[in-house]
Amino acid sequence: MESSICPSALKSNFSMMLLLVFLALLSMLETNARAAEDVSCSDIGNTVTSENELVLVHGDRKGKVPLNIDARVWTVTPGVTVLSSDTIPDDPRVLPTIGNGHIATVVKTDTLCMNGLYNGYAIKTHRALLPAILVRNVSMDGNVTSKYSLDLKNGMFLESHVGESVSVTLKTYAHRSIPQLMVTELLVQNHQEAPIKVKLGGGAPVVTDDLDNTLSGDKSLPLSKDRRVFFGRVKEFEYSWNETRNVTMVYSPIPPYVCVGPNRRLARLFLLSVDSNPQTANSQFTKGVDLFFNNSLESQHIQSWQTLWSNGRMEVSGNDELATLIYSSLYYILSSLPLSEHPDFIGLSPGDLAHGLMYNGHVFWDQETWMYPPIQLLHGKIGKAIIKTRTRTLDNAKHQAMMRGYNGAMYPWESAFSGYDVTPVPPYFQFEKHITGDIAFAVRQYIYLTRDTDFLLHERGNEMIRDIADFWASRAVFNKMTTLYDINDVMPPDEYHHQVNNSVYTNLVAKLSLELPGFVDELLGQPSKQLYTDVTNSMNIPFDKGQRYHPEYEGYVQGEEVKQADVILLGFPLMMSMPEDVRKNDLRIYENATPGGPAMTWGMFSIGYLELNNSADAARLFKRQEGNVAAPYNVWTENADGTGAVNFITGMGGFLQSLLFGYGGFRLRPDRIDFHGRLPPSTTSFNITGLDYLGGSIDFYFTKDTTTVRLTKAAEFTLTLKYDEITVSLIQNENHMFSTKRASIVPELPPPPTRTPASSSSTVGVRNSTNSLSFSSILLIISVLCKTL
């Protein structure tokens, strides 16, 4: 019997036949695709019956509106609130960001981040990167002129391409009032007699390295024509082996191109809705689509940004470059913040919300010391959101203090979702403790500005203040030789030195933490704890009487190099009272000892020199901050050479403070706000809109010779303006102008409630020997390291 296997020649012919059939099928598919493409162009063009109408498209849904009522911003208006470039930078480090406090992305990149979503166990935790399911690029055939603009005023990024009789604009924004939504909208105006095809660059969603690839992916339903669903689950949670967090992303399918018929105008929407709750993600997606067809999706977003700017901003005239830098700095910080207090808000990281891997998205002292003060002054409701990130994690801060053998609450140097310590480098984890005092100092500013007794009594504010004081009382060591309280084994803000004793900054911020309960006790009419007063009055604040300056720590050798602003922070923001020559010596000595330093350092030096009326050195160091700003979108880097964290909002916060507290001269006191307005370099006026104080709002307008104050919203108490021997009651919407000089806004506060007798003196919690790690703390560290290594 012959074999049934084909001879080799027959096999070869059969293979050739298969190849020909395959090529024929491929050709037929390409032909059908081209035909479908032509039909698509023709179909979309024919949906418009008038050249005066704008077609609205999302998925298969279509609508139209008359052009004369269209509320869209087709082009940006050049000015101090717009940053533009004819090309997009090749370096992703200098690309701008868009965000709304819930989600954020670096434009043109393929990932985004969501507030509160972290991946990694313990010290490896970092913001999880999610796929940015967005239209990121557009292109069309022919010669075009392009422009890429960050519109600060309206909170959006616009990419425009203009050719002969055609224009294409891609607008991208994180919706300011619907925080789940990231919006891309394609606007096409075709004035040609032929259809045009606009190619879209986006791509299908992919599972990122932070998501479990066995559980994450596209979960779209077959009937969901206008939307698809991407489900993600992070691989590891911070301090639980069996807990993870989920995220749902509802998104518009992105075709490879969009066609627009001759003499037609098209607006096509692409939405991405992101939330940990699937129902919320889906419902907000639906809401966004409906608002688009009601022609109000974009207008609501713009109105939310306009409300933010009208409620609080700073402006200068005569120096457009500086004016834009002010707007962009405030824009980037606000883009990482919710509109008001939110229970799920985690906090600000040095590299903003969009840059999830910069400092791992962790929350440091940067939040309270650098970003918080200008936000609280200009946007009080948002400022409270920052403060409440610390009451949210108060219980875990208490647990950490207990594990380390201390009383009260000890906040970690770096925290993320859980509020436990996730600091990856041991010396910082072990020694950098001033952050607990920094948090108390921020709360002090909040209470000075708001007198928010509800926060104190019902939102754990009073509890947090006392827990922090209890920590410092137990952390301090009574030195029998000097009869002073020492704080040993710490790392100061100058991170070049660690495990030092009596860091002057740390000790002072601890002292202020211990003083705060007394102010709150008076405010609430409750008894004070004598222990706080005892430690406060005897805190060791290093001072060299011979050379009349403050050594950075016990044993500091003058001239030894330091990393950043440290001792000079005593004068501001801590507002320690000291003779003028001592303040001058501190500034001179530590400027010479700080060759580099992150951006915010120079703003603090500038403030110090303005206190001494040294305008030349103040201007020199104020200008030095600009060395950390990268063109064309004013993206800040941590260091002037471009290294370190990108979009360094810590530096932006320091810069805004150098304006408010430097050239504005604002100082927050328990019973008033002092100010002394001066003009920043190369400006003709300096305007502060919407300074929030005791429920009211005040505008300040400074020129070279005059100051104008205007109360725009009544406060809870009558406010008076005082300067020289003059006292003027502020009346809403009335201007008061005077020759520029030191002045104060003073509220007519009611008398404090009667206080109950003070508690007896106690030494409980005071340590009489050098602090060391508790045994339980050592076990914790070992277990974490074993898990992560």
Image (cartoon, rainbow, N blue to C red):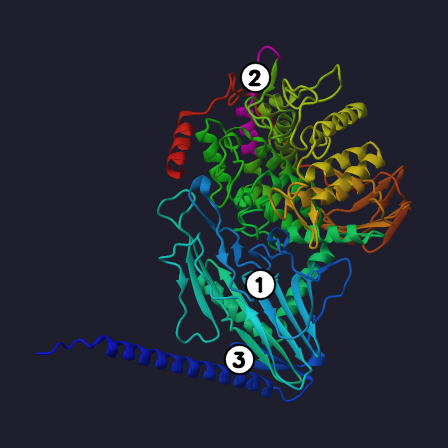
Which residue lies at the image location 46% right of the left edge and 80% below the top edge?
A: 30
Where in the figure is residue 25, as x and y percent of width and height?
A: 39, 82
* Camera-side mark, 1 or 2: 1
Instruction: Choose between 31 and 334: the one closer to the eye.
Output: 31
Q: Amino acid at mark 2?
A: Phe
Which residue lies at the image location 73% right of the left edge and 21% below the top edge?
A: 549
Q: What range of the chain is rendered magenta?
A: 466-482
Q: Crowding at label 1, few (<14), some or many (≥20) Cα neighbours within 10 Å? A: some
Q: Amino acid at mark 3?
A: Arg
* Camera-side mark, 1 or 3: 3
Q: Residue 472 colored magenta?
A: yes
Q: Amino acid at mark 1?
A: Ile
- Residue marked by disc 2: 478
Where in the figure is residue 329, as x and y percent of width and height?
A: 69, 50
Q: Residue 224 colored magenta?
A: no
Q: Are marks 2 and 3 in contact (CB under 8 Å)?
A: no
Q: Earlier in the sequence, mark 1 or mark 3?
A: 3
Q: Earlier in the sequence, mark 1 or mark 2?
A: 1
Query: Residues under labels 2 and 3: Cα distance?
Result: 74 Å
Q: Is residue 737 above or below residue 274?
A: above
Query: Residues under labels 1 and 2: Cα distance?
Result: 53 Å
Q: Is residue 99 left or right of residue 226?
A: right
Q: Crowding at label 3, few (<14), some or many (≥20) Cα neighbours within 10 Å? A: few
Q: Earlier in the sequence, mark 2 or mark 3?
A: 3
Q: Crowding at label 2, few (<14), some or many (≥20) Cα neighbours within 10 Å? A: many
- Residue marked by disc 1: 178
| Residue 450 visible in image | no
* Camera-side mark, 2 or 3: 3
- Residue marked by disc 3: 61
- The label on residue 464 is none
For numbered disc 1, what is the local secondary structure? Answer: loop
